[in-house]
Amino acid sequence: MADYHIRRATVDDYAGVMDIGDVYFGNDYLRGRYHLFMNDPNATSYVYVVGEEIVGFCTAFLIDDGLTFLVRASRVKKDFQGQGVYGRLMKHVYAEYKDVDSIRYDTMTTNDYNFNAKKDGLKKTHTEVSRKCFLNYQFKMEDIDSPTLTTDLLLEEVNSSVMMSLFGDKNAHKNLFPEGKIIVDWVPLRLLPANMKYILESKTLALQSRGDNSLVSLLTVGTPIRCERGTRYSLDVFGSDASALPHHMTRHLEYLRSLTQEYVVFQIIAVFELENMLKDFMHGLRATPLDTPMSEMIYFEKTMSTYQVRRATADDFDGVMDIGDVYFGTDYLRHRYHSFMDDRNARSYVYIIGKEIVGFCTAFLIDDGLTFLVRASRVKKDFQGQGVYGRLMKHVYAEYKDVDSIKYDAISITTNGFKALKKHLEKTHTDMFRKTILSYCFRIEDVNVTPEKSGLLEEVNSSTMMALFEDEKTRDTLFPEGKILIDWVPLRLYTSNMKYIMTVDTLALRSISGNSEASLLTVGTPTECHLGLRYIVDVFGSDVTVLRHHVTRHLEHLKALTQKDVVFEICASSDFGKSVAGIMEDARISPFPYLSDEVISLEKGFQ
């Protein structure tokens, strides 16, 4: 490739940009909009120049009050395609916008033909938001029949103020804009006043009709633009009211007759439910479909890559809490955030877009530094599915890659989480063990427990716990995997892990069998959460006969700790399921169905 440079486009570049050629099968809109792009304060156009020849072009927009970055009209001259021109042009454009703090989203629309050619890359970087059918016709206005309607329907023209009323109406949102966007002439826009100039251009015709309940049931927006074939008329349909559709179509065709008698490219974008009806309607007019490889419009969005990942501090508390609860009201992070900050074995990280914290996690070195573990990871709802978590993890792992002590990478995951990642996890991780989670929610004052007289229970402190770890028979009985799982954290039987096992309010109990050996160990860990107090009882061993005594004692301990609502979780082997259910049923405590039913502990070699 010869020497090149990329610069801002000007009005004087018009002829050179047009010489790049048509890129939309004769339907290219740029000839009719080039000067509008030059004069738009929200748009910046760029040319890629080799020698003195313009071989590439695109226009970058900031829409949605600056929230969203959008590239339109991108193209590369045929003789220069496949030589990296487009990639270098995009790299330059993105670099120019990387410091714009307002940008949160990077959006695009494409057709199914282009998507299929690039889908592997797009699926990695973007989230698919919606699809609509795309119908394409060409005809001369004088050659098509005028539609005959058998019913009357009042159609109302929509201006800017009426459109804003629709944007503010909850029913209109549900019926017309379920994604919270309006896509007009392939441009996805949030429902904001600042976008009105792109929705209602000078020659746009927008119509609305109402259903039997007097609510707007169908909105159509027709946008004409000159193209090589004649006039391209893009008709965007919002809603699925089939009964009103022929009236809208007829009115738009009448409007087209007033604009031109030449050839028309008539493009319709609508929900798939209307596709067959639209085809029948156009067939009845004797309109000929255009033979193009495109039949769908697909809308994508991703988080703009103007982000940073850095170490979290105590001052980030409010921003991290604003990410939201990720465990159905039982999230422990609010209670443990500052202890994570103070833990010398932990480093917490925040993912920031602009000035907003949208992601968080804490990385721990446990097991005397042998094991790497990530806890409390989360991504703000509006940014999920956009690669935030992946980039955050990539940064965190990079920070630990040179820590020589690390041998293992451990995670605990829910059944649903495992199913979603099963193909990947089965290749990379070893399934260490699984335990059943039984969850209950109640007010502690409503629970009436009667202490059991039989069964010997002893409270366990740190030194007693270490004695259990060191006794070979006890290890085989209670910890056959060589680990203790406490509040979803898998820990080797090391002294250095004791601070994670025995916290200030932890109650650990053991029962002794007839041969004076520990037959069952339970560890109860309380944590404040949104719902009140979360109390998880981790069960070790298989002596079902003494389980009732342990559960009763933990409930007594709870009464001393709180009068709030309690989320009570029991984590045990699957053999305990029926016994736990019977104990809680006897206490008239109802299950809490929203939490996980199983925890899976996985491990792999650290890479």
Image: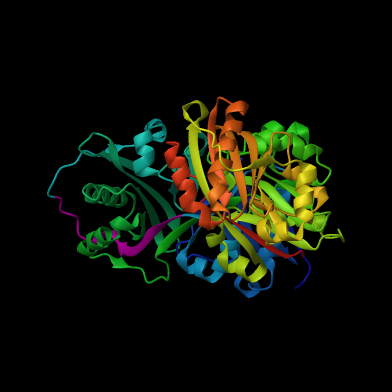
Residue 438 falls left or right of residue 71:
left
Seen in the picture, residue 540 relative to 116 is either above or below; the reply is above
Q: Give the range drawn in magenta.
A: 130-149
Q: Name the colour scheme.
A: rainbow
Q: Nearer the viewer, residue 206 or 476?
A: 476
> Percent position (x, y) of residue 86?
65, 64
Q: Position of residue 54 (x, y in %)?
A: 67, 63
x%, y% of residue 167? 41, 35
The quarter in which the N terminus is drawn is bottom right
Count all numbered tags in the image, as a single digit: 0
Dividing the image into 4 quarters, which one contains the C terminus? bottom right
Residue visible at 39% across and 39% down? 173
The quarter of the picture where residue 288 lies is bottom left
Tell me, yes or no, if residue 347 can be seen here: no
Question: Was residue 145 drawn as part of the magenta stretch in this picture?
Answer: yes
- Position of residue 403 in the picture relative to residue 139 (left or right): right
Relative vertical location of residue 77 with respect to residue 217 in this rendering, above or below: below
Above-or-below relation of 19 to 445: below
Up-down: is 421 above or below 593? below
> Front-most of 252 and 601?
601
In the figure, is residue 94 to the left or right of 233?
Answer: right
Q: What's the residue at 60%, 62% (across, down)?
A: 124
Query: Please, which residue is most extreme toward the front here?
Result: 514
- Which quadrant would residue 160 be assigned to in this image? top left
Q: Is residue 416 left or right of residue 466?
A: left
Examine the rendering and report whether any part of residue 134 can be seen: yes
Identify which residue, 86 or 385, lies in the foreground.
Answer: 385
Q: Is residue 159 magenta?
A: no
Q: Quadrant of residue 43?
A: top right
Point out residue 315 in the picture as x, y percentages from the top left corner: 76, 31
